[in-house]
Image (spheres, rainbow, N blue to C red):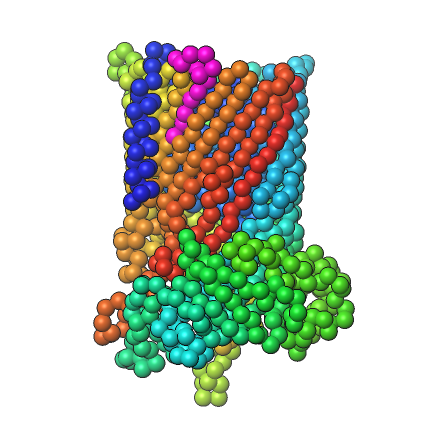
Amino acid sequence: MISRTIALKSATALALVLCAAPAFAQDTSPPQSDETPAEGEIVVVGQRASLGAAAKIKQDSANVVDSIVADDIGKFPDRTVAGALQRVPGVQVTVGGNNEIVGPIIRGLGDIMTTLDGREIFTGVGRGFAYQDLPAEALAGADVYKTSSANLIEGGVVGAIDLRLHKPFDFKGFTVAANARGIYSKNTNKVSPIAGLLVSDRWDTGAGEIGALLDVSYASTDFNRPIAFNCDYRSGNHGPNPVAGGSAGLAAPTCVGGLNNEGNYRRIQTNGAIQWKMSPEFQVDLTGLYTSYASKWASIFLIDDLFGGPFSNVQATSDCNPYDVGADGFYANPYTATGPNPAVHRETLCTAQSMTVGSHGGFTSTQAHNDRTDLFLGAVSAKYEAGSLMLKGDVSYQRSLIRNQNFILDTLKVGGGMVSTITNLNDDGGTVYSSPGLSNPVNFGLSPLNQDSIREKGSEFAAKFDGAYQVGSILKEIQFGARFADHKADHQQAVIGTCGTVCNTLITNVSFLPAGFMIHSSGIPTVNNGLGVVAPDQDMLRDPAIQDQLRTYYGLAKGWPAFQPERAFNAEEKTLSGYVQLAYDIPLGGAVSIDGLVGARYTHTTRDIRGAALVTPAATPANPTPAAVVTPYTASTDDNDFMPNASARLRLGGGLQARLSYAKAIARPSFGSLNPGLSYLISTNILILPAGSGGNPDLKPQKSDSFDATLEYYFGRDSYISVAGYYKNITDRVISQSQVEAINGFNYNITRPRNVGKVTLKGVEVAGQAFFDFLPGAFSGLGMMANFTLADSEIKEDVDARMLGQSIQGVSKYNFTVGALYEKYGVTGRVVYTHRSSYYDEIYGGTTIRPAQGPITSLQPNPLVLNMVRPGGRLDASLGFDVAKGITLSVDATNITKNNYRSYYGRPEFPRDHRFDDTTYSVGVSAKF
């Protein structure tokens, strides 16, 4: 309720402030018909100019579009693409495991078509693009399409994001731009470098005008993201010595733990373009992009097995509820298909607040990753424009290769005997405790060894043709085009795990392990007061010689294991699309007119996917418990989709306009989601319930019918305010859901995607920006920007009745951004706060206990547990100084408010994760000549 009140007040204040600003300098120039500025017209220098250019794109676009335009070459408003996109109305982001801003979603949904200069781009075998792999320094701008039209590539039920690279014809002549930055991380206490260089020129020759551009960038980043977590909650009546041990009547996590995601990643990016304008009518462009991501990092875990020892000094909260509990203390359904379950009892339990746990076990683990992603995209296009006719052809090829290797060694405290003190099980959504035993290097022994190796290849050949014929009068233009794409994906994986005969062997007795093999991790603020735990050194675990020695010691073959057929799939998808679209413009007298688009896109899609699944044969008297068998799986689909669209814009003059639009869109399931195989680590550790993931070959494409309306007012110089309403009806929405599955006699918490029947998403967006030129002197450089989004989603139909009425996974109901701007006398400043309300990111199907619902009279579905993420907001700031002509010095800070991710198992009383997001400070310099 508090966040809702603040957000509504922010939206109201925004409207009042912007409307109160003087409007005596109205821009009454006629809008351009193009979606983006024409080549050779991109002259953007400074923060205000970039915001003004973005407002102009928004005003002139035939679609509902919000844009970001770079302040200058290499000067995107934020350091990352996703970081900048979070400022766009209706766009929400998350923080990734290495503290990068990742995963932008539009109006709460991530089913987005991402294009680079109008060409589809993706990473690996997915359909999405890893935005963090393309540095913000390389971009000229980004356009967020919230409505669809026939000329846009299909594939996003909520919209599309087009990323735009610089081109040589964007500049007047020879241009050199360079930038460098050092970023200090609070979590690592280290400085990481970023640098970029762009060189561009254009020449008039006897064969026409030629331009060439080369842009390169480099970044090396050290990171550390500490995470504290609670395992599934459990009844204390079923722990060791529950009455004498003091755990009777308690609801407490079966274990507590944490991890540090720490290491380094390096990114290299190169893009280039050659443009050749042979004549005023004909132009050929050749473009290429290469990005490389390489990371050596580790997840260093610790687990304290609380239910392995007696409780004392117990304090419980007043939160007491009835729970249905099985013999092991976890949740169990009180009814089976044949009647009441005698092993399940309804118990009243009170949530534990603090305790001391004596003489129990624990373990640490180092997951040493060696990851690499390489992406290449090359394209050639030709454009002919003469008189009323425009024709454009484009051929592109891209290839993405991912190679990830994860060498995992668990170590345990031999003999147990640890004592843990839980100071607070729910300190603002996280647990505070001490466990000095895991920080003491004495008596650590070997535990399971696991290996996880992945190779993914994704590629696409695409050819498209677009044309337009200007008719004139009311029918302004006829647009038409076609596209063919051949998309291939191949995924290979191997997972091997074993204890061999060496588990519990003391590390000190393993002679080949070098001195310093066991190190202290970086530590987690709420665990042991930040003191790290003892775990294997990640660099040594990546050493091929040590890896082979450990493999031999555990009885495994040397080298990385061969890929396993039950974890592999390959797919090929071919799409053929065509569209026709009419652009109209109806004058109504004076400055009033109506224009818009009416069109349709037709797509034919064929897909073949081949994989394998573990299938358990039927039991026989001779073999009552048959083992699962690797069974090949193939599936072919043939889909036809017709996607009409219509839009109208009423221009009333004086900068006031309104829009109405309708569009049908589709989003195809990712290849990985269709894979029938499983990915899971072999269960060899009794302290935790192992997890895994699998696909669903029966997934259907998502389809949406979208209705949008806007009212927009552009005033002054570079200022505007807009209000938008939207309604989406989505069928076959895909969500992730976990449940316990038995594999070879072990229980695993397996997460799979599935379709829900029908969901709706509706909401309101208010956005605007204003610059206060009317203020005196230095104050005239002040400005502000703000936006507010309400996203109200609901699941209308679902085979899982528990989900009816729930919001859509990943959707925050409220999201707002407010920022103060300044630009005057060579000084540029910005302070921006972005907030999103609570949401859930997983339907949890694990064993955690959950409050009982209703009398025990019949078989009921398991009570729903959603992994809820608490509200959060980030404050970022930047300040720039023009120290000389073409040279700017800047300082930046991110996450000044130290916002962290906090989640809980359905109820705030049962916290789950506390992830410590980084705060950074940076100093940079940019130069342009």
Question: Is residue 812 in the magenta section?
Answer: no
Nearest the viewer among 113 and 683 is 683
Residue 511 visible to an observer of this rendering: yes
Please indicate whether residue 732 sits to the left or right of residue 129 in the image: left
Asked if 595 appears above or below 628 in the picture, the reply is: above
Task: Check if residue 779 falls in the magenta segment.
Answer: yes
Q: Quadrant of residue 513?
A: bottom right
Query: In the figure, is residue 63 to the left or right of 271?
Result: left
Q: Nearer the viewer, residue 51 or 397?
A: 51
Give coordinates of residue 459: x percent, y percent.
58, 46
Quadrant location of the C terminus in the rendered image: top right
The count of marks equals 0
Q: Residue furthest bottom?
A: 622
At x 63%, y 16%, the residue is 885
List the single residue furthest toward the front.
313
Instruction: State the residue in front, 3 or 19.
Output: 3
Determine the residue positioned at 61% across, 37% down: 183
Residue positioned 42% across, 22% down in the render: 783
Q: Is residue 201 above or below residue 309?
A: above
Question: Is residue 103 something one can see in this rendering?
Answer: no
Seen in the picture, residue 723 relative to 442 is either above or below; the reply is: above
Residue 63 location (% of width, % of height) = 38, 30
Chain part drawn in magenta: 774-786
Residue drawn at (36%, 56%) of the image: 908
Residue 710 position (above or below residue 259): above
Q: Which part of the image, by quadrant, shows the N terminus?
A: top left
- Coordinates of residue 641 in the picture (x, y in percent): 38, 45
Q: Position of residue 448 (x, y in %)?
A: 61, 70
